[in-house]
Amino acid sequence: MTFYDVKQKYNGFNFEKYIGNISDEMIKNSIQKEILDSMDFLNLLSPKASNHIEQMAQKAHEISVKYFGKCILLYAPLYVSNFCINNCVYCAFSTINKIKREVLSFEEIEENCKIISSYGLRHILLVAGESNTKTPIEYLKKCVEILKNYFEGIDIEIYPLDESCYKALADSGVDGLTIYQETYNENLYKLLHTNGEKSNYRYRLETCERAGRANYRNLNVGALLGLNDFISDIFFTGIHAKYLQAKFQSAEIGISFPRLRPTVGTYQPKTLIPDKNLIQAICAIRLFINRININISTRESKKLRNNLIPLGITKMSAASSTEVGGYLKKGQSEGQFKVKDTSTVDKVKEMIYEKGYQPIMKDWIAL
C-alpha cells in the first residue's frame, strides 16, 4: 500500500457537509486533545476554527518548544537550471514560457557555493528545473560533490526519480528531498499539468516513498497554496506527512506552506490565501503532528515570517535567490518566483534572536 491507496479511502467523503456541521464545541475538544485524529485535524482547518486561532497558537507554541526548543535552522536554495520538460500552467519554468534557459557549469556552481557559504549557511537546497536530459543524474551527482565541500546538509528539489537514482544521489552526499505535490486534487492536477512527466499524478505522489526506501534523512512535502481549495490541500498535506512519519520512522518529516507568488505567465491563482488562513494551517499542523519540521521560505514577507516564529517554525530560508546561479549573476535570468523577504542572513539571524530564538547554521554532521 502507498499513500495513493490511503488517499483513495477519502473518495466520496463529503468535506463540505462535514465542515458545515462542525461546532465550536468540536473545535474546542480537538484543541484540548493530546492525540488528534484526521477529523480533529479537519475541525481545526475549518472556517469556524478561525475564531479559535489564539488558543491554537498558544498550544502550537507549547508543543514546538517541547519538541524543538527555540531553534530555527537556516538554509538557502541554489538553482542550477531552469530547463523543464513540463507544462505547468502556473510556473515560470514551464515550457510555454519564453524565458532565458541555462544550466550552470560546475565552475559557476562552485562560485555560487563560495558566496552562499560566506553568509555562514551550512545547509543548501539544490534546485533544478525538471529535465532529465539537461540535468541528468551524473550532472546532479557532480553538483553534490561540489556542494559537499561547502555544506554539511544537502537537500534536493528536482524531478521525481526512481529508487535506485535516489540511492545513487544519497551515496553522493544528499541527505533529504523536498517535493511538492502542488495540489492533491487529482482531477485539477491533470488540468494544471498538461504535458511532460509531471502529468503523472500518482508517480509524483509516491516520490517521497521511493526516497524513503533509499534511506533519506529528510522528507519534505507541501501543496502550492492558491491552486485549489485551501482546506482540502492542507488536509491531505497533513495526512501525507503523518503517513510518511509512520512509514519511515528514522526520517525527519517536514511540511512547507508555499503560497503562489507573482511570476512569468498569465496564470492567476484560484484564490489568494490570507495570512490568517496560513497561520491557522501552521497551528493546525503542529497540533495534528507534534514532531514535524515546518518550513517558511522567502516567499513570505519579513513581517509575517517574524510573527510566525513562535508558532512552530523550525526551518527558514534566508538571502534566497530563485534565479539560476542568482548569487553570482543577479538579475540575469527570470526567477521561479519573486522573493518577498530580501533580508540578508545577518538580518534574519537578528530577527530570530529578537524573538528569543536561536538561529542554527548546521544541525548535524555525517560521520
Image (cartoon, grey):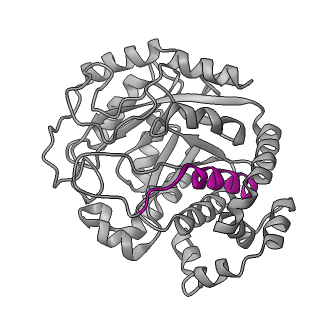
- Magenta span of residues: 271-289
Q: Residue furthest bottom?
A: 12
Residue 48 location in percent, x, y?
Answer: 69, 68
Residue 1 located left or right of residue 245: left
Seen in the picture, residue 117 relative to 308 is either above or below; the reply is above
Q: Residue furthest front?
A: 51
Asked if one can make out residue 14 in the rendered structure from this viewpoint, the answer is yes
Asked if residue 121 lies in the magenta stretch, the reply is no
Most common SS among magenta residues: helix
Residue 205 location in percent, x, y?
Answer: 46, 64
Viewer-closest of 237 and 225: 225
Q: Residue at x 71, y 82 (%)?
A: 21
Asked if residue 274 lies in the magenta stretch, the reply is yes
Viewer-closest of 90 and 77: 90
Callout count: 0
Asked if one can make out residue 217 in the rendered structure from this viewpoint, the answer is no
- In the picture, the quarter occupied by the N terminus is bottom right
Viewer-closest of 248 and 256: 256
Q: Residue at x 76, y 53 (%)?
A: 56
Residue 290 location in percent, x, y?
Answer: 75, 51
Residue 239 located left or right of residue 79: right
The quarter holding residue 199 reads bottom left
Seen in the picture, residue 184 relative to 341 is either above or below; the reply is below
Q: Residue at x 40, y 51 (%)?
A: 260
Residue 65 located left or right of residue 156: right
Q: Residue at x 58, y 43 (%)?
A: 218
Seen in the picture, residue 85 relative to 313 is either above or below; the reply is below
Q: Residue furthest top?
A: 118
- In the picture, the quarter occupied by the C terminus is top right
Residue 139 location in percent, x, y?
Answer: 28, 36
